[in-house]
Image (cartoon, rainbow, N blue to C red):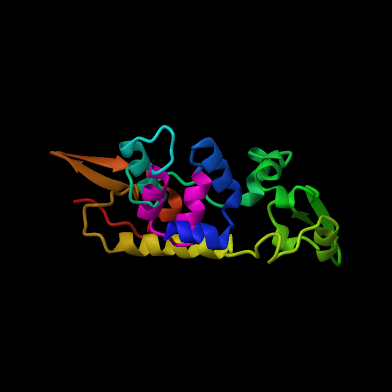
Amino acid sequence: SLTSAIVMLRNVKVTMRSDQRTSGEHPRTSTFLVEGLGLPWQDGMLHFADFLVDYDVAINSNMWQNAGCVGLDPYYVGMNYKRRMYWDKNGQYVRRWCPELSGLPDAVDIPLDKTTKTVDCLYEPWATPLEVLERSGVTLGDSYPHRVCDDRDSRTAFFSEVREMRSKWPPGLIDDRKRDLVSLGSTDIGLFTPRALQIRQPRYSK
């Protein structure tokens, strides 16, 4: 179940703690649970129905359908933690909701043969050098869990499954602009369809 996964894996602890304390729901929570862990979007819908302070059955259902790429507006947020400078520039969000990592520096440079690699310690603790983790009191697998999924592999597999499903749709459900089509009476409406979900050889509407 979704609750069991949250308790056992704990990798969503930052956004889940924030969501539960503020009675909200962060889009990256749904992305991680559905896209990263492969959990049914229905589980997330039912879980958040229990504690959202502004719970609305239509909005909650629609947003989780979107997260599962079966809604009318399948936006894509993704698990791209490398873009964290846009939403957590100073690391305050992680340090507030995940104090286990609060002692880590924002980033460290790892020297390579001819260059250096910058590791974002707060968002990539699994890639942080061991000596940095030890100085900060972080022990992976003890004070903080090991990484539970590779975001790139999970995202690639998820999109591949969605494209495979869409490729089996009957003709007329995808237009020549690669959009999903929804029939409203005598009119077909083309819905926003993220490029990552578009099949390479779209079926043309009749």
Magenta residues span 27-49
In depth, the one of 55 and 104 nearer the eye is 55
- Image coordinates for residue 117, horizontal then vertical, percent: 79, 58
- Image coordinates for residue 194, horizontal then vertical, percent: 42, 48
Q: Is residue 54 left or right of residue 145?
A: left
Quadrant containing the N terminus is bottom left
Q: Is residue 198 left or right of residue 140?
A: left
| Main SS of residues in magenta | helix
In depth, the one of 45 and 108 nearer the eye is 45
Give residue 113's quadrant in the image.
Answer: bottom right
The residue drawn where x is 46% and y is 56% is 3
- Is residue 85 depicted above or below 164 in this figure? above
The residue drawn where x is 53% and y is 47% is 28
In the orientation shown, which residue stands out farthest toward the left? 186
- Is residue 77 depicted above or below 155 in this figure? above
- Is residue 163 depicted above or below 97 in this figure? below
Q: Is residue 202 left or right of residue 171?
A: right
